[in-house]
Amino acid sequence: MNRKALFIRPDTLWRSRPQAFARIKGSALYPNLTGTVRFYEHPYGVVVVTEVEGLPNPESRCSSPIFALHIHQGSSCTREVGDPFADSGMHYNPQNCLHPYHAGDLPPLFGANGYAFSACLTNRFSLDEIIGRTVILHSSLDDFSTQPSGNSGTKIACGEIVRRLRWR
Ligand SMILES: [Cu+2]
Ligand SMILES: [Zn+2]
C-alpha cells in the first residue's frame, strides 16, 4: 500500500473528482434543503464527504440539531407513504446485521446555522455496492441502538447515488 495514500489531505480531496455522488434534495416540507454527498475510493475504504444547507436551525444552544445519515437500499427517492421517499427502503444491509452495524449506517450530521459538513471513511461498502442506491437524511439524531433504524425520525432529504459523470 502506498503510504502517502494513508493520510487524506483535504485540499487534494477537494480538487479530485469523486467516483460517485448524490445530489441531496429536501422533501416538500424542506424545500430549501440541498446538498451533495461525494464518494471517493481510498486504499482503506470509501471516503464520504457530505455538505448540506437549508437545515432546520433551532435557536437554543442546547438543542443544536443532529441529523441521522444513512445509505438506504432502495434505488429511488420517489413515493410518499406517510413518510416521503418510501422507495428508498430500509438501511443498506447486505450482511443482515443489526443497526448500527448496517453497511449503510454513517455518522450523523451536526447542523451549524442550517449548514452541515462531514467527511468520514468507511469500509462497510464498496462504490459498486452503493451506486444506484439512496442517501437519506433524517429529522433526528441516530441513537445507535434502537432497531431497525436508530429512532431517527422522519426522512427530510434524499439523494440517488450515481456514478460520476459530471457533478458540478
Ligand atoms: Cu435512514
Ligand atoms: Zn442502520
Image: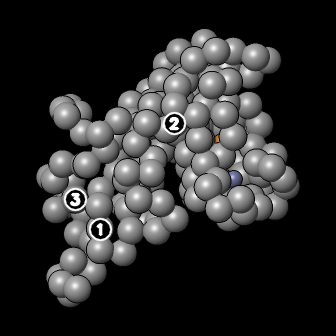
* Type of amino acid at the residue the image marks with label 3: Leu
Does 28 appear above or below 43? Answer: above
Mark 2–mark 1 contact, CB under 8 Å? no
- Rendered image: mark on residue 13: 3
Q: Quadrant of the C terminus?
A: top left
Residue at point 52% right, 31% down?
A: 75
Question: What is the C-alpha distance between the residues marked 2 and 3?
Answer: 22 Å
Query: In front: mark 2 or mark 3?
Result: 2
In the rendered image, residue 21, in percent from the top left (x then y), is placed at 34, 40
The quarter of the picture where residue 132 lies is: top left
Q: Say few, some or many: other residues with alpha carbon within 10 Å of mark 1 (under 14 / 14 to 19 / 20 or more).
A: some
Mark 1 sits near ligand 2, with its Cβ under 8 Å away? no
Instruction: Name the residue tied to disc 1.
Output: 42
Q: Amino acid at mark 2?
A: Thr
Residue at 24% from the left image edge and 39% from the top image edge: 164
Instruction: Of the two numbered discs 3 and 1 on the same chain, state the one appearing first in sequence.
Output: 3
Indicate the quadrant containing the N terminus: top left, top right, bottom left or bottom right: bottom left
Kindly identify the residue that appears in the image at 65 percent across and 62 percent down: 95
Task: Indicate the amino acid at tag 1.
Answer: His
The foreground one among 34 and 167 is 167
Q: Secondary structure at mark 1?
A: strand
Q: Is residue 37 left or right of residue 124?
A: left
Q: Secondary structure at mark 2?
A: strand
Which class describes the residues within 10 Å of circle 2: few (<14), some (14-19), or many (20+)?
many
- Image mark count: 3
Please name the residue that numbered disc 2 is placed on: 134
